[in-house]
Amino acid sequence: FLHDKANPPVIYRDFKSSNILLDEGFQPKLSDFGLAKLGPTGDKSHVSTRVMGTYGYCAPEYAMTGQLTVKSDVYSFGVVFLELITGRKAIDSTQPHGQQNLVTWARPLFNDRRKFTSLVDPRLEGRYPMRGLYQALAVASMCIQEQAAARPLIADVVTALSYLANQGYDPTTAPAHNIISSSSKERPKTARSSKNDEGGCSRW
């Protein structure tokens, strides 16, 4: 809604898991619009602003230059989606060295399909459809592309996730990582690693 229905679009600028609340019907609600910013209008491709946000969720181009676009929110959404898939935090100092930044840890694993299962929250105990995992990782990978232009629009992300959510799966069947469909061998697009993921965003 903020990107597609609002005119000009509204860039949330601090999309993170702790700002997503659930009502009694488990419908998500965004909170804390204090950093929201009106997006670019006319021929403008971005708005320039002081870098604000939360460490681990900021898009690299925004953290480095202060240039804000709707694709900045898409990157942050990708981080939150990775949190859902992996069961990890965006930044977790309790993890081993090299694994504390979720995006930095996950990106190399996108290159090897044999390692996809290592990205899954172990609390699922292997009960997930492998094809669904491939599709979810493809969406997450595209959202966290280093280059903003390579990321999808949030409307396209919604379309992909709506399709994924409508796929049936019986959790009482055998663990899905033992059943790999020949129709699901496509890898998610890979994002290049960046040393600037942390940028100038605050840690809190």
Image: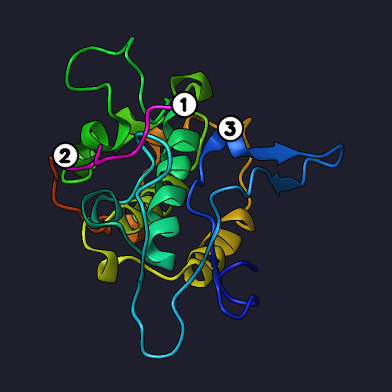
Instruction: Give the residue pinned by disc 1.
Output: 87
Start-end of magenta stretch: 196-204
Viewer-closest of 44 and 195: 44
SS type, badge 2:
helix
Instruction: Compute the Cα span from label 2 to label 3.
Output: 26 Å
When the figure is inspected, residue 149 is found, relative to residue 134, above or below; the finding is below
Residue 192 rendering spot, x and y as whole percentages: 14, 51
Q: What is the three-letter code of the residue carrying label 3? A: Ser
**Residue 131 appears in the figure:** no
Ranked by sequence position, the earlier of labels 3 and 1 is: 3
Instruction: Give the residue pinned by disc 2.
Output: 108
State yes or no: discs 3 and 1 in contact (Cβ < 8 Å): no
Name the residue: 28% across, 28% down.
101
Say few, some or many: other residues with alpha carbon within 10 Å of mark 2 (under 14 / 14 to 19 / 20 or more): some
Ranked by sequence position, the earlier of labels 2 and 1 is: 1
Instruction: Give the residue pinned by disc 3.
Output: 18
Give the residue furthest to the front: 50
User: Most prominent secondary structure in the magenta stretch?
Assistant: loop
Say few, some or many: other residues with alpha carbon within 10 Å of mark 3 (under 14 / 14 to 19 / 20 or more): few
**Residue 137 appears in the figure:** yes
